[in-house]
Amino acid sequence: SIKYPLPMDGSVVTFSGPLFEGKLVSRIRDVDDKPPSDGNLMSNEDYFRNRSRQYQWSVQGRFKKRIRFDEVVTGQEFGRPFRNAPSSRIVKKGLHLLKHKLPDTFECQLFSDEPR
């Protein structure tokens, strides 16, 4: 069995850093399932049942001091292209509609060999 540095069973992990504090919930499909350690009633098996998703990462918290939105960095990188992604035309249209709400530093490379 693989040992993960964070629980992957939906347990809540609290954290605090110099700029942000909050909590994180993470799950990965097909990770050894045990009852969630924080009393969460939904097992990984129940969470992923009848869904095609492979993982869940949710973060909730607050910034400890004011920070400009265009200085916040978040995101994901993937080691291979997406399967069953929407057409590039649909994605480009959606990003165009959101452009006025996104910072100039926003970057999206959904259709590259390593999407991010």
Image (cartoon, grey):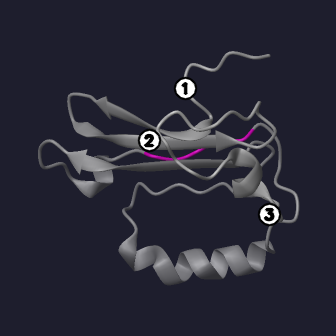
Q: Are marks 2 and 1 in contact (CB under 8 Å)?
A: yes
Kind of residue indicated by mark 2 = Leu
Q: Is residue 54 visible?
A: no
Asked where in the image residue 34 lies, by quadrant, the reply is top right
Q: Secondary structure at mark 3?
A: loop
Residue kind at label 3, given as amino acid type? Arg
SS class, disc 2: strand
What residue is disc 2 on?
24
Q: Position of residue 14 (x, y in %)?
A: 35, 34
Q: Secondary structure at mark 1?
A: loop
- The percent position of residue 36, horizontal first and vertical second, equals 58, 38
Give the CA distance from mark 3 to mark 2. 21 Å
Q: Residue at x 63, y 20 (%)?
A: 4
Instruction: Determine if residue 82 is in view.
Output: yes
Q: Nearer the viewer, residue 90 or 55?
A: 55
- Prevailing SS of the magenta stretch: loop
Magenta-highlighted residues = 74-78
User: 4 or 87: nearer the eye?
Assistant: 4
Viewer-proximal residue among 30 and 96: 30
Mark toward the start of the polypeptide (3 vs 2): 2
Q: Badge 3 is on which residue? A: 51
* 85 falls in the magenta region: no
Q: Position of residue 80 (x, y in %)?
A: 82, 42
Question: Is there a contact, CB below 8 Å, between mark 3 and mark 2?
Answer: no
Q: Callout 2: 10 Å neighbours few (<14), some, many (20+)?
A: some
Image quarter in which the N terminus is found? top right
Q: Is residue 76 magenta?
A: yes
Check the image and name the residue furthest to the left. 65
